[in-house]
Image (cartoon, helix red, strand yellow):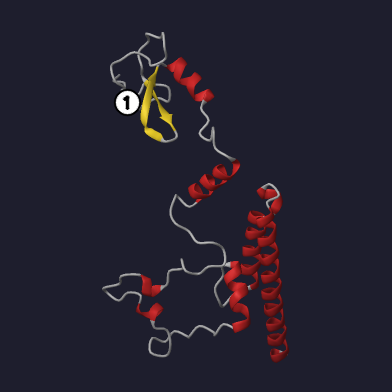
Amino acid sequence: MMTRKNTRHRAFDPDPDAPARCCDMAGCDESAGYRAPKSRDALNEYFWFCLPHVREYNARWDFYKGMSPGQIEAHIRDDVSWNRPSWRLGQRAGRLGPDDFIDPMDLMDGARRPGPRTGTPARPEMPEALRQPLDMMGLDWPLSMDALKMRYKDLARRHHPDANGGDRQSEELLKSINVAYTTLRAHLTSAREADLERTA
């Protein structure tokens, strides 16, 4: 019976791209089959170790060593957005709309020009008094109560002082978020009650 050869790379097999050299650990003459980054600023430059020494090196590795708590927090936030630019809560400058895309075949025509011509209803006009609260929450109009509550829970969890080491700025931001949430919830509640009265 013919047995199929397993060519899958096992977790602890040496790196197939390992150079033919000895372990970089001083005094070790074992083959170097495992790589490890030299530093957080040189992640594409490697030490080459034998298996016991790469395990020892990895156990001592601390990516954030030497960084202040503020630098660590900033780095984590950058990682969350894949190190791409983002905008502070309350700013809408980063929002993309249909006009921000190149659309040579005019596939987004309905999204760009809503109304009677395309048969799509126009978006309801946003009350001016809600513009600032919506910006603060990072939400668009029209808005449902469920979407508002979901967004509020997310922001409250993210900016609560307990989740940010008692940071005073987070506390002030959370106060502004609470005010915006209260304003939007009150408007949606009164609008819903008005609709119920009209249909009663």
The residue at the point 42 percent across, 36 percent down is 41
- The crowding category of the residue bearing disc 1, from other C-alpha atoms within 10 Å (few below 14, some 14 to 19, many at least 20), is few
Quadrant for residue 117, please give it: bottom left
Q: Residue furthest left?
A: 104
Q: Where in the figure is residue 198, as x and y percent of width and height?
A: 69, 91
Q: Vertical placement of 170 versus 59: above or below?
A: below
Q: Is residue 12 left or right of residue 102?
A: right
Figure quadrant of the N terminus: top left
Q: Is residue 155 left or right of residue 92?
A: right
Amino acid on which the number 1 mark rests in the picture: Thr
Q: Is residue 124 left or right of residue 12?
A: right
Label count reads 1
Q: Vertical placement of 54 versus 164: above or below?
A: above
Q: Nearer the viewer, residue 104 or 121?
A: 104
Q: Where in the figure is residue 151, as x and y percent of width and height?
A: 62, 64
Q: Where in the figure is residue 91, as x and y percent of width and height?
A: 53, 68
Q: Nearer the viewer, residue 90 or 108?
A: 90
Q: Where in the figure is residue 62, as x and y percent of width and height?
A: 53, 30
The residue at the point 48 percent across, 52 percent down is 81
Q: Nearer the viewer, residue 141 or 194?
A: 141
Figure quadrant of the C terminus: bottom right
Secondary element at image label 1: loop
Q: Vertical placement of 21 versus 38: above or below?
A: above
The residue at the point 49 percent across, 25 percent down is 58
- Residue behind mark 1: 7
